[in-house]
Amino acid sequence: MSNKIAILIPAYEPDRHLLSLVAEIEEEQNLKDLPLIVVDDGTKEQTIFDQLHAKYSQLSAPGG
């Protein structure tokens, strides 16, 4: 049986640092094949999440 892990990032009112973190994870050879889950913890301003979704189309957005 293989163990499976994912990277989970809870994000409340994120800034550009979240974009940098996701980019670094995507570039890291040992991490890029792991599922990456970014959870919106109730942020009202969705700009950063919109930017993440535009750059990484494999991410799913609520209702999408």
Image (cartoon, rainbow, N blue to C red):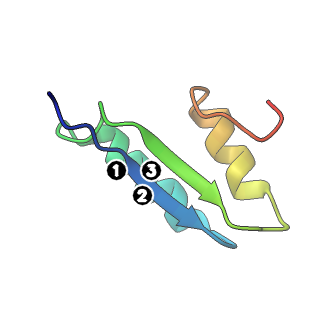
The x and y percentages for residue 60 are: 66, 34
Mark 1 and mark 3 in contact? Answer it, CB < 8 Å. yes
Q: Is residue 13 left or right of residue 7?
A: right
Question: For mark 1, what is the residue?
Answer: 24
Mark 2 and mark 3 in contact? Answer it, CB < 8 Å. yes
Q: Of residues 21 and 44, which is closer to you in this image?
A: 44
Q: Quadrant of residue 62?
A: top right
Q: CA distance from mark 1 to mark 3?
A: 5 Å
The x and y percentages for residue 48 are: 69, 56
Q: Is residue 16 left or right of residue 26?
A: right
Q: Residues within 10 Å of mark 3 (few under 14, many from 20)?
A: some
Residue at the image point whose x is 48% and y is 60% from the top: 9
The disc labelled 3 sits on which kind of residue?
A: Val
Question: For mark 3, what is the residue?
Answer: 22
Residue furthest bottom in the image: 13
Residue furthest front in the image: 1
The disc labelled 1 sits on which kind of residue?
A: Glu
Mark 2 and mark 1 in contact? Answer it, CB < 8 Å. yes
The disc labelled 2 sits on which kind of residue?
A: Leu
Residue at the image point whose x is 36% and y is 39% from the top: 26
Question: For mark 2, what is the residue?
Answer: 21
Residue at the image point whose x is 62% and y is 44% from the top: 52
